[in-house]
Image: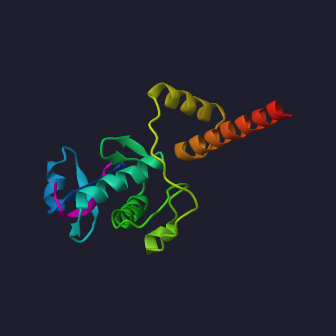
Amino acid sequence: MKQNAKVYVMQDAGGSIKIGHSTTPSKRAKEVGRSVRVVFESPMLEHAEKIERLAHRVLALQGSHIRGEWFGATVGEAISAIKIAQRQAENVELPLGGKLKRHLLNGDVAPKKGVLVPVTIPHDLLGRLDAMRERQEATASRSSFIRAAVLHFVNHLDEAKRKDVS
């Protein structure tokens, strides 16, 4: 585990983003196995591996995960995710949710109301939710759609409980 390293953002010719950590990102770019360019690298950071993992989680919650360390995100979103991850690694509570905002690029990271709750969703259920989202031609991110579905279900349970009581 690298404690002191740089967290980097690489982009391939197709626009896909890779977030990783290395003491020498330019050297790492040559080892990736496809043509990439380093579009961002942080200064040397303590706990770079932890920050990388947290940044992956931030982007995954936005619904932009492709595979492994690769994401269908913009460079700005990747940099914002790294900044959020740095704040999380410093034990500053930052609930996640919604879209990555442009103002995050300026370092203005205002937490939203809420609490991050890691949830493992079985693949079959995730597939059903994705199909439902496509049928509804929803423009919301996968994470936003799942939050809305959970809220709808909880409201439905509350309503059913009220009917049972009366």
Outermost top residue: 124
Please state the horizontal and vertical placement of residue 36, each as a whole percent of the image: 25, 52
Please state the horizontal and vertical placement of residue 68, each as a whole percent of the image: 30, 41
- Determine whether 45 is above or below 71 in the image: below
**94 with respect to 144 (left or right):** left
Span colored in magenta: 1-13
The scheme the figure's colours follow is rainbow
How many marks can you see? 0
Outermost right residue: 166
Q: Is residue 39 visible?
A: yes
Q: Residue at x 35, y 51 (%)?
A: 56
- Determine whether 31 is above or below 21 in the image: above
**104 with respect to 48 (left or right):** right
Q: Residue at x 52, y 66 (%)?
A: 111
- Determine whether 10 is above or below 110 in the image: above
The quadrant the N terminus occupies is bottom left
Outermost front residue: 165
* 133 and 148: which is toward the camera: 148
Q: Can you tell which quarter of the image residue 149 is in?
A: top right
Please state the horizontal and vertical placement of residue 54, each as a whole percent of the image: 35, 55
The quadrant the C terminus occupies is top right
Q: Residue at x 24, y 61 (%)?
A: 48
Most frequent secondary structure within the magenta stretch: strand
10 in magenta = yes
Q: Is residue 10 visible?
A: no
Please state the horizontal and vertical placement of residue 33, each as a whole percent of the image: 18, 44
Q: Residue at x 37, y 61 (%)?
A: 85
**115 with respect to 2 (left or right):** right
* 114 and 6: which is toward the camera: 114
12 in magenta = yes
